[in-house]
Image (cartoon, rainbow, N blue to C red):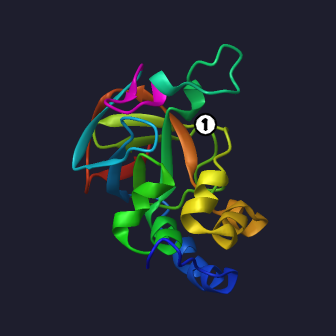
């Protein structure tokens, strides 16, 4: 798939059932991506998640957020997590997943029914907490994956499984590796 080829709504709908089959617990970290600067993506085999800085080396803290009163980074958007199956569907080849802009790509059911805000996840040695901040497809997502993909991830059906992903904050710092288990904390 080249950058000018995007999936149609019909093709996206065909892949939806596979996303719905994601495991509800005992997920797996499939990819870690650091965003050191605007538009930059660096795939990593391991990373450190920090309560204050988020993913060490990522620009979340320095970049800030235009919708906070003072322009500082939004604490409930510290870590962006996308379902690996959804990334594979909208991006096609694995080398394009990181264009979505998320830091963790995991094979796990990210639906609000399975992971409501407040749910804690053990990810490697770290613990993150799912927040209620919506994570939706934006203009950049549309440029990278097409109009149909953006409309689909933002649709009622796409939001049902949080196809575009979820936001989380680090509540216990720790190391995360590709291949680590992702487990819901009781």
Q: Residue furthest top?
A: 70
Question: Closest to the observer: 1 or 82?
Answer: 1
Where is residue 37? Give x, y as percent: 40, 35
Magenta span: chief secondary structure: loop
| Secondary element at tag 1 | loop
Q: How many marks?
A: 1
Residue name at image x 60 percent, y 77 percent:
16
Tell which of 98 and 118 is nearer to you: 98
Q: Quadrant of the N terminus?
A: bottom left
> Quick check: 15 above or below 53?
below
Residue 43 placed where, x, y %?
29, 51
Q: Which residue is mark 1?
A: 131
Q: Tell me if mark 1 has few (under 14), some (14-19) or many (20+) residues whose alpha carbon lies within 10 angstroms of its own.
A: many
Image: magenta residue range: 52-61
Give the vertical position of 58 relative to 14 (above or below).
above
Q: In percent of the image, x 54 and y 62: which residue is there?
A: 144
Residue found 32% across the figure and 29% down from its top: 56
Q: Is residue 54 in the magenta section?
A: yes
Closer to the camera, 79 or 7?
Answer: 7
Farthest-out residue, front: 4
The residue located at (50%, 32%) in the rendering is 78
In this rendering, the answer to whether 51 lies above or below 158 is above
As drawn, 155 above or below 89? above
Q: Is residue 163 visible?
A: no
In this image, 51 relative to 75: left or right? left
Tell me if 130 is positioned left or right of 58 in this view: right
Q: Is residue 135 magenta?
A: no
Q: Position of residue 67 (x, y in %)?
A: 71, 27
């Amino acid at each position: 798939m080249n950058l000018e080829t995007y999936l149609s709504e019909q093709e996206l709908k065909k892949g939806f059932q596979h996303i719905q089959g994601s495991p509800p617990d005992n997920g797996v970290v499939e990819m870690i991506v650091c965003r050191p600067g605007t538009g930059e993506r660096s795939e990593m085999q391991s990373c450190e998640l920090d309560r204050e800085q988020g993913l060490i080396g990522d620009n979340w803290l320095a970049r800030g957020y235009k919708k906070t009163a003072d322009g500082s980074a939004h604490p409930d958007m510290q870590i962006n997590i996308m379902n690996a199956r959804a990334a594979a569907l909208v991006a096609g080849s694995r080398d394009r997943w990181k264009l979505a802009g998320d830091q963790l790509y995991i094979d796990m059911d990210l639906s609000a029914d399975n992971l409501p805000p407040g749910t804690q996840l053990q990810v490697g040695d770290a613990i993150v907490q799912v927040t209620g901040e919506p994570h939706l497809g934006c203009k950049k997502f549309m440029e990278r994956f097409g109009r149909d993909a953006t409309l689909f991830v933002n649709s009622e059906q796409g939001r049902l499984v949080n196809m575009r992903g979820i936001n989380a904050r680090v509540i216990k710092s720790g190391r995360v590796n590709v291949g680590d288990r992702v487990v819901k904390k009781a």
